Image: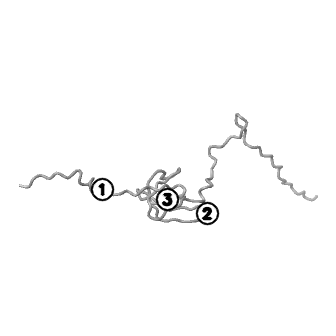
Amino acid sequence: MTKRKVDYSRGRPQARRGPPAGPDGAPVERPNLATINMQAGAGRAGLSVGDRVRIGGTGLYAGEIAVIERLSAGAIPSALVRTAANNTRQVRTIDLEPVPAERPPAPAERQAAPAERPPAD
């Protein structure tokens, strides 16, 4: 008697259904769905190495002031920034907001409050 071949055929794929509709009939948007900023490819003009910037958007170091150490061009321009706490991060240039450089106080402001010295005897 000859052995029969065992048939390990695959089952038929089941039809995939879409996500359930919301209360008004529109599809429900998932909260963990990633969104793509199509304007990020343009980047932000006017940034250069050494500029002070604020990190915008969401994520690590968001809202902190940083200094640009390196700019890199590509499909999505980015910059390597160093924060005040000496941490570095690669950030899209679209997420960077220029911060005006801090200027030293004017001479009149420096002399407004002279330091009191006791008289020498």
> Who is closer to the viewer here, 30 or 50?
50
The CA span between labels 2 and 1 is 44 Å
Give SS at disc 3.
strand
**Contact (Cβ within 8 Å) of mark 2 with mark 3:** no
| Local SS, label 2 | loop
Q: Position of residue 6 (x, y in %)?
A: 86, 55
Mark linked to residue 75: 2
Sequence-wise, the earlier of marks 2 and 3 is: 2
Q: Which image quarter: residue 103? A: bottom left
Quarter holding the C terminus? bottom left
Residue found farthest to the front: 108
Viewer-side residue, 103 vs 93: 103
Q: Mark 1 points at which residue?
A: 106
Q: Residue furthest left?
A: 121
The quadrant in which residue 39 appears is bottom right
Q: Which of 110 and 6 is in front in this view?
A: 110
Sequence-first tag of 2 and 1: 2
Q: Residues within 10 Å of mark 2 (few under 14, many from 20)?
A: few
Mark 1 neighbour density, 10 Å: few (under 14) some (14–19) many (20 or more): few
Residue at which label 3 appears:
89
Q: In this view, does 40 lie above or below 25?
A: below
